[in-house]
Image (cartoon, grey):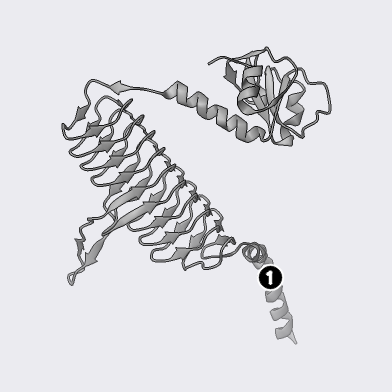
């Protein structure tokens, strides 16, 4: 893709400071710039790179004023980071767009496929499946009976979507992820063995969700496991049966939400967090990495840390005291010895 600085500025509703006729054909980090590349500057920590970058143009915020000589052409916009993200989306969409049905794929005759569909080789699409326009399903994927997938979705290679699951619009699911595998439900018997409880529910993934690679979203025992609109999951995330993740909540890698728990909207959950079953987490809570949530959090917009987790500032104070315990122990031992000597 090639575009002039003037055209780009018009697209972004920006202002050009420099040569508007320069042609751009790639993007680059500001510290790794090259001729014909577009970079951006949003974090002032990287400002020193602006004065020696080899990039031809740099996106900056409207209120930015340089403190030295800038060789690159500047494009001033309301939000440099957001504008650059928008351009990356457009670039990726053009670079990765595929269409057509590849040889070796198997599509049941009852399946309904929209226009501009891509189905990769060795993909299996089962009975009663419905797939919306402009959706791409990469090779070796499996789409089970009666699955519904919306428009403009990307299902990367090796994704498995079990029967009756529902995927909304603009959803991205990365390789190795399983949607709708059985929930972890087993009934203990008198002989201390376990009998499997049938999992007859499904998974519902609403619009604008992205799920990282090798994650697992279990189907509900009854009803639905639900990822609400705008949820973002990292790689290796486990969402158990009947859990509900609220709108625009983000969960980092290796975290798990146990069965029937409800996580609110706009929460931020760090890596390796564990949330026990049958509890709820209120909207807007931030949970630091490696924390364990063992009970319901009713307060909104709070920060938590520890295992079991408690309020962030208090947990940091407790950590400081914990590190001092060996010295405190020695001090107490010395005092005890002096008292016994009297």
Q: Is residue 174 above or below residue 233?
A: above
Q: Residue at x 61, y 31 (%)?
A: 83
Q: Label 1: which residue?
A: 328
- Report the number of numbered marks: 1
Residue 58 percent coordinates (x, y) = 69, 24
Tell me, yes or no, if residue 184 can be seen here: no
Relative to 340, is 184 on the left or the right? left
Residue 251 percent coordinates (x, y) = 48, 49
Relative to 240, is 29 on the left or the right? right
Relative depth, front residue between 174 and 167: 167
Tell me, yes or no, if residue 151 can be seen here: yes
Q: Quarter of the image for the C terminus: give it.
A: bottom right
Q: Residue at x 19, y 69 (%)?
A: 189
Relative depth, front residue between 57 and 35: 57
Residue 316 percent coordinates (x, y) = 65, 61
Residue 174 percent coordinates (x, y) = 39, 36
Q: Secondary structure at mark 1?
A: helix
Relative depth, front residue between 91 and 254: 91
Q: Is residue 1 above or below residue 263?
A: above
Mark 1: few/some/many CA within 10 Å (<14, 14-19, 20+): few
Q: Residue at x 36, y 62 (%)?
A: 260
Quadrant hosting residue 340: bottom right
Relative to 260, is 286 on the left or the right? right
Q: Residue at x 54, y 28 (%)?
A: 88
């Amino acid at each position: 893709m090639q575009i002039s600085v003037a055209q780009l500025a018009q697209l972004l509703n920006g202002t050009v400071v420099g040569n508007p006729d320069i042609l751009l054909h790639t993007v680059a980090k500001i510290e790794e710039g090259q001729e014909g590349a577009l970079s951006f500057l949003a974090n002032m920590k990287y400002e020193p790179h602006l004065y020696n970058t080899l990039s031809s143009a740099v996106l900056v915020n409207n209120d930015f004023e340089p403190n030295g000589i800038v060789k690159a052409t500047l494009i001033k916009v309301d939000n440099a980071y957001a504008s650059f993200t928008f351009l990356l989306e457009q670039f990726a969409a053009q670079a990765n767009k595929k269409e057509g049905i590849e040889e070796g794929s198997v599509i049941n005759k009852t399946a309904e496929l929209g226009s501009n569909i891509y189905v990769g080789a060795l993909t299996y699409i089962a009975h009663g499946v419905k797939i919306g326009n402009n959706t791409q399903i990469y090779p070796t994927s499996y789409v089970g009976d009666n699955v519904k997938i919306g428009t403009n979705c990307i299902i990367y290679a090796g994704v498995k979507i079990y029967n009756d699951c529902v995927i909304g619009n603009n959803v991205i699911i990365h390789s190795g992820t399983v949607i709708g595998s059985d929930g972890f439900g087993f009934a203990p018997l008198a002989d201390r063995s376990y009998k499997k409880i049938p999992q007859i529910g499904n998974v519902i993934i609403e619009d604008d969700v992205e799920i990282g690679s090798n994650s697992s979203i279990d189907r509900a025992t009854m009803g639905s496991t639900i990822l609400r609109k705008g949820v973002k999951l990292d790689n290796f995330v486990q969402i158990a049966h009947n859990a509900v993740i609220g709108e625009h909540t983000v969960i980092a890698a290796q975290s798990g939400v146990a069965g029937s728990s409800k996580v609110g909207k706009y929460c931020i959950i760090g890596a390796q967090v564990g949330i026990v079953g049958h509890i709820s987490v209120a909207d807007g809570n931030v949970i630091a990495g490696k924390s364990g949530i063992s009970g319901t959090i009713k307060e909104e917009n709070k920060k938590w840390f520890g295992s079991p987790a408690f309020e962030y500032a208090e947990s940091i104070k407790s950590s400081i005291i914990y590190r001092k315990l060996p010295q405190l122990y020695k001090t107490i031992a010395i005092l005890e010895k002096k008292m016994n000597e009297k």
